[in-house]
Image (cartoon, grey):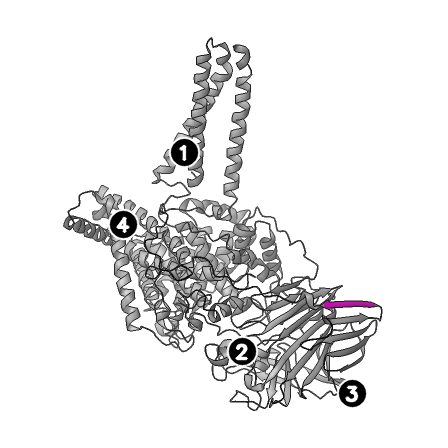
Amino acid sequence: MSSYTRGAPTVFFINSLWLLLRLVSAGVRADSDPGGFVPFLGGNYDGHPMLYFSREDVEGLQGAALNSHRLLARGIREAAEEMLERPEDYLPPWSPAQFSARWNEIYGNNLGLLAMFCLLYPHRAGALDMAREYMERMAAQPNWLVKDAPWDEVPMAHSLVGFATAYDFLFVYLSRSQQERFLQVIGNASRYMYEKSYHRGWGFQYLHNHQPTNCVALLTGCLVLMNQGYLQDAYLWTKQVLSIMEKSLVLLQDVVDGSLYEGVAYGSYTTRSLFQYIFLVQRHFSISHFQHPWLLQHFSFLYRTLLPGFQRTVAIADSNYNWFYGPESQLVFLDRYVLRNGSGNWLAEKIRENRVQDGPGQPARGQRWSTLHTEFIWFDPSLRPTPPPDYGIPRLHYFEDWGVVTYGSALPSQRNHSFLSFKSGKLGGRAIFDIVHLKKYSEWIRGWRNFNAGHEHPDQNSFTFTPGGVPFITEALYGPKYTFLNNALMFRPSGHHSCFAPWEGQVTETCNSKWLKFKQGQAADCQGNIEAVLEQQGLVFIRGEARSAYSQELKARSIQRNLLLLQPELLLVVDHVHLQPDSPVRRFSAFFHNTDTPFQTTAMDNIQGAFIQHNQDSYKMFWLDDTGSSEKAATGYWSYPHGYPYNGSNYVNITMPLRYPHTRVAYIFFGPEVEVQSFSLRGDSERIDVYLATHDHTYTVHLLTGEAPSKPLFAMVLEDQKKKIVFERAAAIQERPLVEVEEYVNAVEDNLQHVKPVFQQLERHIQAKVLDSGKFQKTDKRKPVASVKKSFSLSKKQKAKGGKKGGLADGPSDIFAQIEAREKRQKQTVMKRGGYEDVPDENDGDSRAFIDYSDTRRVRKGAVIKGRRFNEVQAVATVGVSHSSSSAYIRLFLILNILTFFLLLAVLLLRLPKAQTLHTQRCVYCLLLVDSFILLCLYSSCSQSQC
C-alpha cells in the first residue's frame, strides 16, 4: 500500500505551492485597478489631517519632499517663501469692504499652498504664524462673496475649499479656540453653499466649470464637519453634492473623446475640482470613477491641444494663452490613477520646464499656486516620465465630440514643426447638443436650461495656424462673442437685427452680453460639421460645413471651408459659398486675427496680401477669388470693452462680392521657409482648381465642392505634376449616434448608497466616545458632541414611542432615514414654490429642472421602478486604523492559518512517511485540504479589505 502514496507528499507540496502562487497573482490582479491606489477609509478617521492623507502619512510626505518629490517641493517652498517675504501682498485684508471689493479667489487659492508648506516644513520660522493669521483674517469676514456679484458663489467656493483644506492640514497647530471658530466658519459657508445649490445654475447646469468648483468646495467642508461630528448637516450636504456630481459623471460618459466643450483653459478649471472630487469620493465613500471612459481619453485633450514649444494651447472658446489651473496637477493625477505609463508625468515635466515666467502665457497671479499641493500629493515618482509612442511625429487628431481637429501638437519648437487647428462642431459639443435635441436623460434634463454654453464663441469653421512654431493666425482669446473675432465669415446685408448691421454673423453672436446666446431660437440649434479629416503622404485635408451656424434668412445652401496643408509652412484655405436663388446676400467678409502682432498690407502681382513681422522673418498671406479678383484688405486693432482680461486683437479683414450660385475664395498662408512665385485659380459648378508654385514645388489642387460630384473625391493634389495625392469621400467622417447610459438613474442611486454606511460607522464611533467616557463631556464641550448626543437622544425617544427595545446600535439607520425624509419634504416645498433666482451672468435655468433621485426612478422605456433593491453597501475600510477591529481579526486569523498550514505541511513531509496506517495519512491530507480552503477564504476577505 505504501507504494501508492510514497510520492504523494511531494505532489501535494507542489500543488500547494501552485495554489499559493495563484492566490498571490490574483491579489496582484485585484490591485491593478487604479482605484486601489486610493485607500477607502470607511469612516475610520483618526483626527486630522484626513482629506487627502492621514496623520501617519505626514512623516512620509516630509521625507518625500527631501527625496522623490524634491522638485515639486521646491516649487511649493519658493511660492511660500515669496509669501513670507511680502506678507501684506498676500494676506487677505481685515476689512470686509476691501475683501469683497474685487474678485477674491486668490485668497482661497493661496491658502492651500501655504498650509501644505507648513505641513512639510513645520519648523520654518513664521510660516505657521502667517497661516494662522491668514485664517484669522478670512474668518473675520462676514462672508466670502464679491460685493458686485453677490449672485456668484464661485469666489466663496475658492475660499471655502482653501480654508477647509488648511483647517484639515493644520488642525494640530491651531488652538482650541481657533479650531472651534474656524469650524463654525466652515459650517456657515457650507450651509450657504448647500442652500444655494437648489437655486443657482451650478446645481443643475451639468458639465459647466462652476459645478465641480462649487460642489467640491461644499464636499470639502462636509468632510471636515463630518470628521468633527456634525453628522446630520454633513450627511444632507454630502448627498446633495453627490447627487449633482454623479449625474454629471454619467452624462460625461457620452463625451467619447475626452474633451470639455468650454475649451482647454476653462477645461483646466473644471478638472482642477473634478479630479479632487474623484479622489475624495473614492477615499471617503469607495466610489470609484478611475475607469470612467471620459477619464481614459482625457490625456489626449491635454496632449493634442498643445502648440509646439509646450507653452500655448488651442485657445478655443473663452481662454487665455494656455490653462487657468494646472495642468501639471491633473496630469500627474491621470498618470497615477488612470494611465500608469509615465506619459502624464512626462508631459507635466515638459510643461513645467517650458513655462512662461514673464509675458503672454504666464500664469495668473491668483491661480499660479493653487494646484501645487494636489500635484505634490498625487505625484507618483515610480512612474518614470515617458513620452507617448508617437512623440516627435506630427499627428492628425479629431475630437469628434468637441468638433475640433488638431495637427502637429506637443512638438519641440523647431522650424519644421507647425501646428494647425480647425473648429466646426455642435453647440456645447455633440453629446450635450444631442442630449438636448434628442431629449435624452429625460429624468434629469429639460433642454438647454440644464447646460451653459456661455463661454463658447461663434466660431464654426474657424481655424488657427502656427507655422514653424510662430503664431500667425490665432484665436482672439477671452473677448466679446462676435463672429468676426473668431476667424469666421460674416455676410451682408443682414436679414434681421444684428450686432453690426448690415453685416450679420453666426446666430449665437451676442451684442450686449459677455456670454454666448444659446438657449432659444435659431441659436439653440446652431451647429457646424466636420466632413473630412484626412492625411495622405504628408498632406492634411480638412473640410467643415457651417450653414447651420448662420441665420436661415441668409438662404445659403452651403458655407464650406476647406483646409489643405501642403507643407509644414504652407497652408491653402478655400471658402465655398453656395446661395439659394432668392438669397438676399451680396457680400461676405473674412477676418483673421493675431493677438500679439499687427498685420501690414502687401501685394504680389496684383494679388493683395498681408503679413506680420516676427523678429527678422515675415509670415505672409494672399487671397484671390474664382474670377481672379483680389480686393485690398483693411487691417487694424479691435479693442475689447472694459471687463475683459485682454485688451483686444489685431486683425486683417477681407471683403469680397458674392455671386449666385457659387463663390469661391482661396487664401494662402506661409512662413519664411516658403517662397511663393505664382498663385491662381479657376472653377466651375462642380469644382475649383488652384495653381500654386513655390521655389521648390508646384501644386495643382482640384477641390470638388458640389453636393453631388461626379467623382467620389473631396480633393486631389498633383505635386510637381508627378506625385498624385487623392482624398476620397469614402473616408468621410461618420458621426456615431448618441447612446443613453442604461439605467442611468439607478447608476447614480447605487453610488449614493455608499454614503450612509460611512456616516453610520462614524456615528457608532462617536456614540462609543460619548457613552464610554465618563469625563468626556466635562473635558470636551465641543458643539459636535452636543449635536451628536442630541441626535442619539432623539433616536432613543422615538424607539421608546414605537415600543422597541434595544441598544443604541440600532439607532443610526433611523436617524439618517429621518434626515432624508425631512429633506425630501423640503425639496418638494422648494420645487412647488419655484424657488428660482435669476442670475445676471449665468442666466440660470428653472429650479424645476431638479429631479430628486429618490422620487422618480424610471427605466429607459419610462416604466416606474418600484421597490428596486440595491446591494447593501458596507463601510469596510481598505486601510487599517486603531479602531478598525474587523481587519485586525482577519489579519490575525490569516497569520495563524498560514502557520497551521506550514505546520501540517511539515508533518506531511517529515513524519507521514513513517506512519504505519493509510488512515493516518488520509486524515492529514484532509486537514491540509480543509486548511487550504480556510486559507483561501481568509485571503479573499483580507484582499477585499486590504488588511
The circle drawn on residue 813 is: 4
Q: Residue under label 2, please give it.
A: 479
Residue 734, image x, y percentages: 61, 65
Considering only order in the chain, which callout, 4 or 2, is on the residue closer to the N terminus?
2
Q: Residue under label 3, please give it.
A: 606
Labels 2, 4: front one? 4
Callout 4: helix, strand or loop?
Answer: helix
The circle drawn on residue 891 is: 1
- Is residue 329 visible from the viewing direction of this image? no
Q: Amino acid at mark 3?
A: Asn
Separation of residues labelled 3 and 4 (CA atoms): 84 Å
Residue 773 as seen in the image, left or right of residue 406? left
| Camera-nearest residue between 566 and 130 | 566
Q: Amino acid at mark 2?
A: Gly
- Identify the residue shown where x is 39% and y is 69%: 153
| Magenta segment | 723-727
